[in-house]
């Protein structure tokens, strides 16, 4: 069977594999809709006083390392299903948000950027 989906997508529910095109700012807003972000807004406001040109980027980069950010983003995006994720010797079952979080780090490790990940989010 030939498919244009990445291999891992063959094991994921449709809600995790549909293409979504978002900016990093839209992604932050979506996670806030899912219940995350009280500290983000405070940190952003404080950093804007110190480093107005880089405050938003610094806060976003920090957010992308926060598992609670990904949990709330997953809640807002409907990534509430458990999905299999390849592991050494087989696979493990993880929440959809955790699957996306791992894909994000893999994307960065391969030379991608947060912007390109969220632009081509699946």
Image (cartoon, rainbow, N blue to C red):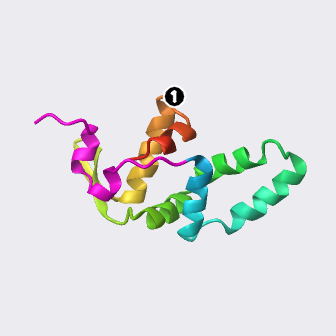
Residue 38 visible (yes or no)? yes
In percent of width and height, residue 89 lies at 22, 42
Please determine whether, in this image, residue 77 is positioned above or below residue 115. below
Was residue 14 drawn as part of the magenta stretch in this picture?
yes
Please determine whether, in this image, residue 37 is positioned above or below residue 62. below
In percent of width and height, residue 63 lies at 62, 53
Most foreground residue, 78 or 80: 78
Residue placed under numbered mark 1 in the picture = 111
Please determine whether, in this image, residue 54 is positioned above or below residue 79. above
Instruction: Identify the residue at horizontal 44%, vertical 41% (top origin).
Output: 120
Q: Crowding near pointer 1: few (<14 within 10 Å), some, many (20+)?
A: few
Q: Is residue 95 left or right of residue 9?
A: right
Instruction: Identify the residue at horizontal 68%, vertical 69% (top origin).
Output: 38
The furthest residue to the left:
1
Quadrant containing the N terminus is top left
Most foreground residue, 20 or 69: 20
In percent of width and height, residue 110 lies at 46, 29
Instruction: Identify the residue at horizontal 65%, vertical 65% (top origin).
Output: 37
Was residue 34 drawn as part of the magenta stretch in this picture?
no
Residue 87 visible (yes or no)? no
Most foreground residue, 50 or 85: 50
Q: Where, by quadrant of the figure, is residue 98 drawn?
A: bottom left
The furthest residue to the top:
111
Instruction: Identify the residue at horizontal 77%, vertical 64% (top origin).
Output: 42
Q: Where, by quadrant of the figure, is residue 103 drawn?
A: top left
Q: How many badges with numbers are in the image?
A: 1
| Mark 1, secondary structure of its residue | loop
The stretch of residues the image draws in magenta is 1-22
């Amino acid at each position: 069977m030939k498919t244009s989906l990445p291999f891992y997508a063959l094991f994921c529910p449709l809600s995790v594999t549909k293409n979504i095109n978002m900016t990093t700012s839209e992604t932050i807003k979506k996670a806030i809709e899912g219940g995350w972000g009280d500290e983000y807004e405070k940190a952003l406001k404080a950093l804007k006083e110190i480093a107005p040109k880089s405050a938003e980027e610094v806060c976003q980069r920090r957010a992308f390392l926060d598992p609670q950010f990904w949990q709330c983003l997953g809640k807002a995006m409907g990534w509430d299903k458990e999905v299999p994720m390849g592991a050494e010797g087989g696979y493990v079952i993880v929440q959809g948000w955790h699957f996306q979080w791992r894909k994000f780090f893999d994307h960065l490790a391969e030379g991608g950027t947060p912007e390109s990940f969220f632009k081509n989010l699946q």
